[in-house]
């Protein structure tokens, strides 16, 4: 694992200057910005005869901003693959804990390739922001600036996000999200398809009549010595 991470870190550095120049040119001339990320995770428990779980996540995240700056198209495609005999949830069960050790649970088939989100984001007058399309609700609701991703932070999911959201949010359907933000508070809400297939854009499932709704009110005061809250 150390050798793998070292290779991934050192390889792009050999031509990082030309790579960054290419991305900068693409951004200026075409309005396209993107990143690739690769995050392997291996976890083992000495209390359970070193039972382990291992998986990876490969992400392609990007955006396109038209020349007139009217809005922005954003996307997130990913591949998740499990290498071990235990999924993250099964590993959690063997440890007797109620939450996953970190991000990476893969569900029943324990592998996934598809589109996590594809939305158009529009800024309106008065500080209102709209997102509509295939909503990645985990990126819109219950966010924490300092500990949002259990895979990159390597914290327990109880720390890195809204652990309740996994029970009541289907993070895959077509919908609309709106947010009004002020300096010390914001309010947001969404309505989205609640029975969509995960891997692509599901245009059939809205006909099922299964919808999900949520609203969020947040306070963002500036605290002396700590800066703005989130």
Image: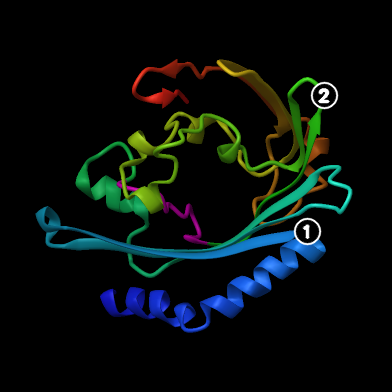
Q: Which mark is residue 91?
A: none
What residue is pinned by disc 1? 31
What residue is pinned by disc 2? 125
Q: Is residue 209 left or right of residue 13?
A: right
Pick the quarter of the image with the N terminus: bottom left
The answer to whether residue 80 is visible is: no
**Residue depicted at x 10% and y 53%:** 47
Q: Residues within 10 Å of mark 1 (few under 14, many from 20)?
A: some
In the structure shown, which secondary structural element does the residue marked by tag 1 occupy?
loop
Q: Is residue 205 above or below residue 230?
A: below
**Residue depicted at x 70% and y 44%:** 196
Check if residue 106 falls in the magenta segment.
yes
Give the mark nearer the N terminus: 1 vs 2: 1
Q: Which residues are magenta?
A: 101-111
The Cα–Cα distance between marks 1 and 2, rounded to whole angstroms, is: 23 Å
Q: Residue 220, percent across and down?
A: 51, 19
Instruction: Examine the residues drawn in magenta and state their main secondary structure.
Output: loop
The furthest residue to the right: 68
Q: Residues within 10 Å of mark 2 (few under 14, many from 20)?
A: few
| Of the pair 130 and 15, the residue shown nearer to us | 15
């Amino acid at each position: 694992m150390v050798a793998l991470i070292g290779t991934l870190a050192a390889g792009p550095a050999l031509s990082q200057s030309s790579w960054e120049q290419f991305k900068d040119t693409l951004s200026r001339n075409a309005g396209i910005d993107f990143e690739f990320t690769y995050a392997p995770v291996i976890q083992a428990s000495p209390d359970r005869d070193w039972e382990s779980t291992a998986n990876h996540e490969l992400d392609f995240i990007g955006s396109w901003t038209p020349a007139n700056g009217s809005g922005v198209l954003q996307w997130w495609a990913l591949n998740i693959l499990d290498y071990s005999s235990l999924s993250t949830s099964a590993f959690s069960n063997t440890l007797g804990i109620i939450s996953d050790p970190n991000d990476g649970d893969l569900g029943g088939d324990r592998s996934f390739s598809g589109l996590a989100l594809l939305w158009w984001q529009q800024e309106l007058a008065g500080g209102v922001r709209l997102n509509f399309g295939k909503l990645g609700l985990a990126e819109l609701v219950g966010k924490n600036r300092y500990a949002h991703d259990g895979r990159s932070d390597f914290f327990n999911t109880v720390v890195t996000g809204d652990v309740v959201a996994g029970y009541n949010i289907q993070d895959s359907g077509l919908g609309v999200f709106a947010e009004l933000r002020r300096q010390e508070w914001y309010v947001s809400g969404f309505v989205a398809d609640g029975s969509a297939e995960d891997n692509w854009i599901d245009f059939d499932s809205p006909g099922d009549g299964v919808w999900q709704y949520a609203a969020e009110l947040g306070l963002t005061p500036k605290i002396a010595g700590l800066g703005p809250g989130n």
